[in-house]
């Protein structure tokens, strides 16, 4: 992870702590989940189309992606 990823997320979706809280409490929108996952994949140098990713996520189930996003937030914000 690098600061560019965090800055990009905050520019697109708002402050990271508030976004993390939305995911922790279940107050997130599917579009936010797809956006964060797309950013995480791009950070790993895996470019993927937003709509294709969203469709894949719906087919596979959102739970695994929510878990991945929450792990990212825990690491980024120093949560154990």
Image: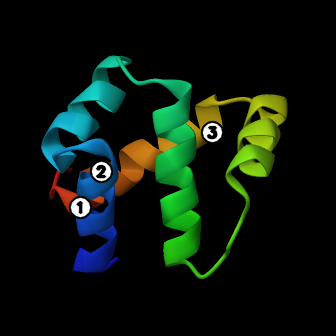
- The image's mark for residue 64 is 3
Q: How far apart, in angstroms, are the residues tagged by discs 2 and 1?
A: 5 Å
> Of the residues under marks 2 and 3, which one precedes in the sequence?
3
Residue 59: % across, % down: 84, 32
State if disc 3 and disc 2 touch (CB < 8 Å). no
Tell me the SS state at disc 2.
Answer: helix
Please indicate whether residue 66 sits to the left or right of residue 18 in the image: right
Q: Is residue 5 above or below residue 74?
A: below
Q: Which residue is mark 1?
A: 76
26 to 42, vertically: above or below: above
Quick check: 70 left or right of 36? Answer: left
Residue at the image point whose x is 39% and y is 50% from the top: 71
Q: Which residue is mark 2?
A: 73
Q: Is residue 41 above or below residue 9?
A: below
- Near mark 2 (Cα within 10 A), the count class, few <14, some 14-19 or many ≥20, is some
Q: Residue at x 71, y 40 (%)?
A: 54
């Amino acid at each position: 992870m690098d600061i560019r990823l965090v800055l990009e997320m905050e520019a697109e979706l708002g402050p990271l702590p508030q976004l993390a809280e939305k995911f922790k409490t279940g107050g997130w929108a599917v579009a936010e989940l797809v956006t964060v996952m797309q950013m995480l994949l791009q950070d790993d140098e895996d470019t993927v189309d937003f709509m294709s990713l969203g469709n894949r996520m719906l087919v596979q189930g959102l739970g695994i992606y929510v878990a991945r996003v929450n792990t990212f937030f825990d690491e980024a914000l120093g949560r154990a």
